[in-house]
């Protein structure tokens, strides 16, 4: 079972002819809403990859539909709390050239309490996985509690924050990060990733696949060929698939292979949580 302490965002897309200047009022010509947040994306990816997942999070009243959507995708939702704070949301303004600006409001995502997190983890069993990103509060408490209970702790270090990694590093068993985050981490610590003492570190490398760093050394895995149309959510899909594989008892190599395939299909699609492929689509595409 994967316990995902993760963000839930409402992504609000506004289409405009140009980005407004300071003081300018501009009418958008289109509007759409979708489920987003790295946490929600990863929960959906885990469910699509056929592992059980319970999301630990918080939303406001106006965001009830996000919990319903997660439930429809096969995510357990009893630990998604409705509180008196707006649901996290991203106002994404896209101009005619496809350039975007984003204003993010973290809202309920950073109002989790220790009792919410503790109640969820009290249902966990040794060997389960706690997954966290850096878009909610409560990571220190959650990782500490999980470690005491014998869970494996997985951390997707995004958005990257060197201080957050430093606070958590002793409790992380599996870390997943992209090439930019890996470079930031090496710069912040002044040491190679191997020196962090984390058992398994997986660095995603976009079109170059990924590398896995462990006490066995470093192993490279090539990506599958793709014509990318939208890379949004590829990393979240990769992480969800990787952890789902490990939770299902598959080895690291097999789990990485599934994650690369899922990431590749994802870059060939527009959209995020709503278009994350399931295992059958991977089987149909890759054989
Ligand atoms: P992030 O979205 O976090 O920056 P990456 O860009 O490293 O993550 O992509 C995550 C995974 O998605 C890669 O490991 C790979 O499996 C897949 N992927 C991303 N870009 C491509 C691409 N151009 N071609 C094939 N696969 C890709």
Image: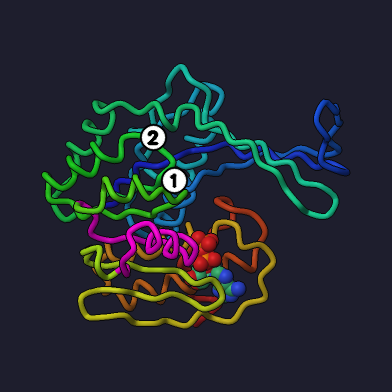
Asked whether residue 264 is in view, the answer is no
Question: What is the x, y in percent for residue 41?
Answer: 49, 50
Label 1: few (<14), some (14–19) or many (≥20) C-alpha neighbours in 10 Å: many
Question: What is the x, y in percent for residue 186?
Answer: 37, 64
Label 2: few (<14), some (14–19) or many (≥20) C-alpha neighbours in 10 Å: many
Q: State left or right for residue 163 relative to residue 97.
A: left
Question: Dot 2 lies on which element?
Answer: strand
Q: Magenta includes 11? A: no
Towards the viewer: 192 or 50:
192
Work out whether 176 lies above or below 227: above
- Farthest residue, direction top: 84
Query: How far apart are the two marked residues, 1 and 2, measured between alpha carbons?
Result: 9 Å
Kindly check if marks 1 and 2 are in contact, taking CB atoms under 8 A apart as contact.
yes
The range drawn in magenta is: 171-193
| Residue bearing the label numbered 2 | 57
Question: What is the x, y in percent for residue 265?
Answer: 57, 69
């Amino acid at each position: 079972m994967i316990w995902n302490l993760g963000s839930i965002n409402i992504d609000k897309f506004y289409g405009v002819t140009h980005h407004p200047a300071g003081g300018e009022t501009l009418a958008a010509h289109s509007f759409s809403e979708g489920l987003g947040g790295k946490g929600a994306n990863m929960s959906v990816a885990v469910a699509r990859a056929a592992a059980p997942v319970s999301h630990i999070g918080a939303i406001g009243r106006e965001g009830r539909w996000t919990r319903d959507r997660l439930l429809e995708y096969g995510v357990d939702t009893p630990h998604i709390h409705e509180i008196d704070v707006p649901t996290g949301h991203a106002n994404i303004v896209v101009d005619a050239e496809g350039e975007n600006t984003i204003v993010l409001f973290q809202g309920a995502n950073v109002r989790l309490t220790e009792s919410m997190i503790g109640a969820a983890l009290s249902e966990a069993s040794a060997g389960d996985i706690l997954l966290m990103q850096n878009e909610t509060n409560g990571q220190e408490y959650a990782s500490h509690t999980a470690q005491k209970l014998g869970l494996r702790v997985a951390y997707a270090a995004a958005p990257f924050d060197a201080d957050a990694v430093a606070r958590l590093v002793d409790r992380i068993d599996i870390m997943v990060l992209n090439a930019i985050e890996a470079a930031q981490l090496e710069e912040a610590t002044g040491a190679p990733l191997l020196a962090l003492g984390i058992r398994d570190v997986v660095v995603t490398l976009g079109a170059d696949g990924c590398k896995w760093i462990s006490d066995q050394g470093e192993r490279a895995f090539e990506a599958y060929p793709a014509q990318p149309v939208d890379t949004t959510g590829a990393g979240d899909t990769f992480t969800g698939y990787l952890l789902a594989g490990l939770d299902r008892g598959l080895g690291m190599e097999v789990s990485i292979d599934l994650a690369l395939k899922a990431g590749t299909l994802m870059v060939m699609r527009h959209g995020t949580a709503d278009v994350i492929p399931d295992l059958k689509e991977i089987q149909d595409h890759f054989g």
